[in-house]
Image (spheres, rainbow, N blue to C red):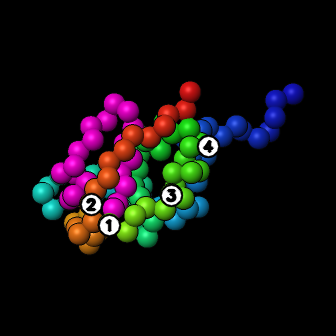
């Protein structure tokens, strides 16, 4: 007999991890008019992930990445493989967050296998 509990996907588990770690999802228009879709941001931790990165990330790697101690002058932006690492976008997001004095540190996520 099949289990009454529906198996959660890696994406669902990763999204729950983001919420528990106090990341909030940002969707909206930046000052330049560029649309931002599905960025998970924690201003206090100074870390952000694009939505595709959270979907694709290995869950064990994500556990470490969301608790990283970022240098006080940086804001880390994680991108999924296949998405454009865009410094202009990162700088616009920092401006929107009121953190424009920080340096954007762009990185790729470690995907699940």
**How packed is label 4: few (under 14 Cα within 10 Å), some, or many (20 or more)?**
few
Q: As drawn, is 41 to the left or to the right of 31?
A: right
Give the residue displayed 56% in from the left and 27% down from the top: 113
Which residue carries the number 2 mark?
103
SS at circle 2: strand
Q: Which residues are magenta?
A: 74-92
Tell me how far mark 4 sits from mark 1, CA to CA.
26 Å
Q: Residue 4 lies in what quarter of the image?
A: top right
Which residue carries the number 4 mark?
60
Front position in the image: 38 or 65: 65
Tell me how far mark 2 sits from mark 4, CA to CA.
27 Å
Tell me how far mark 1 sits from mark 3, CA to CA.
14 Å
Which residue carries the number 3 mark?
68
Tell me how far mark 3 sits from mark 2, CA to CA.
16 Å
Q: Earlier in the sequence, mark 1 or mark 3?
A: 3
Q: Is residue 44 above or below residue 66?
A: below
SS at circle 4: helix
């Amino acid at each position: 007999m099949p289990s009454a509990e529906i198996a959660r996907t890696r994406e669902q588990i990763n999204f729950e991890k983001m919420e528990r770690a106090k990341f909030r999802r940002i969707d909206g228009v930046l000052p330049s008019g560029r649309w931002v879709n599905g960025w998970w941001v924690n201003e206090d931790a100074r870390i952000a992930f694009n939505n595709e990165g959270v979907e694709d990330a290995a869950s064990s790697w994500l556990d470490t990445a969301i608790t990283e101690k970022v240098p006080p002058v940086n804001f880390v932006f994680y991108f999924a493989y296949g998405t454009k690492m865009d410094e202009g976008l990162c700088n616009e997001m920092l401006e929107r967050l009121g953190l424009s004095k920080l340096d954007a540190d762009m990185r790729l996520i470690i995907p699940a296998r």
